Amino acid sequence: MASEQSSDGGAELGRFLRARRTRTAPEQVGLKAGTGLRRTPGLRREELATLAGISFDYYVRLERGKETRPSPSVVDALARALQLDDAEHQHLRELAVRAARYAPEPPPAPSRTVRPHLKLLLETMRPNPAYIVSRSMDLLASNPGGLALYAGLDDWPATQRNLARYLFLHPAARELFPDWDIQIRACIARLRALAGTAPDAPDLTTLVGELVLKSPDFARLWDRYDVTGRKATHKTFHHPQVGEVTLAVQSMDLDGTPGQRLVAYAAEPGTPDHDALLLLDMTAPEPGSGRRPAMNDVPQPPRALP
């Protein structure tokens, strides 16, 4: 079992190196592309090995998952040669550590239970939409606005509510996000980073397997192996209930609940965006009610004065 775990880690390290190598153009690292046709895009293995100052045979073993104990200096040299950013460099280090260690038993999956005081916290944040997600982006708890913000997500059973699944498979997602292509790349990057350190996690492998089969966009981007995405501070929604709204967004890991994150949205009071949040909160069904109030049954919030 131990050797099997280590081998899997080596394979994941090799996949990451191969993905980054094929996406690094010779011109990016000061090499001439030459006049002959290249069988594959990006750098050749021997070019990357030379740039990193390691032997060609050693690099081939790394990429094939046969070499599982690269030294920190080799990892750093490969990161420099591939011009990785800080997040990608750290991901490569984590992959190398995982490839080198023996793990007799996989770590237990993080708890999906949301503690009562966190649910209370979500309620006190109204009308600001807020929710708690698992490491694989399952929606574990939310206040009414937090669920209603993702238009149509409440059509799915609670066990199917996953934000990655929503982005790629729900028909409303492309209309909701004017920058949908950026949103899906950030989503892929988060899942890829998780896959690098917990590739056998059942919650992740089940989700990825489903999305690879059902979404050509997901399958294409998954193969690119991006592990960094845009860190959004604001998101714009084209919401069918309240119109266009731009909100500040903040996410944070929760103490004592590994793998769970709280995500909250806010707008400046007195602005049209804040009025939209008030309206969204008032028209969203309460948890367990299953009924969304009709728009003409709800008192309209005052609009900001010009």
Image (cartoon, rainbow, N blue to C red):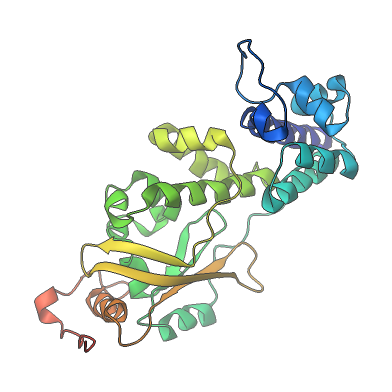
Name above or below for residue 61 compared with residue 274. Answer: above
**Height in image: 71 above or below 244?**
above
Query: Which residue is found at the position 86% from the left and 24% from the top?
Result: 58
Q: Is residue 257 left or right of residue 57?
A: left
Towards the viewer: 145 or 116: 145
193 or 123, which is in the foreground?
193
- Give left or right: position of 286 versus 126: left
Residue 225 horizontal/vertical position (percent): 59, 38
Rendered view: 176 above or below 169: below
Q: Is residue 164 left or right of residue 2?
A: left
Camera-nearest residue between 214 and 156: 214
Query: Is residue 113 shown left or right of residue 43?
Result: left
- Quadrant hosting residue 298: bottom left
Give x and y (percent) for residue 121.
Answer: 48, 82
Q: How many marks?
A: 0
> Quick one: quadrant of the N terminus?
top right
Taking the spot 71% from the left edge, 41% from the top edge, the residue there is: 83
Q: Which quadrant of the rendered structure holds the C terminus? A: bottom left
Occupied quadrant, residue 81: top right
Specify whether residue 66 is in view: no
Residue occupying the point 73% across, 36% down: 13
Q: At which x and y percent is residue 281?
A: 29, 78
Q: Is residue 77 visible?
A: yes
Residue 94 location in percent, x, y?
76, 48
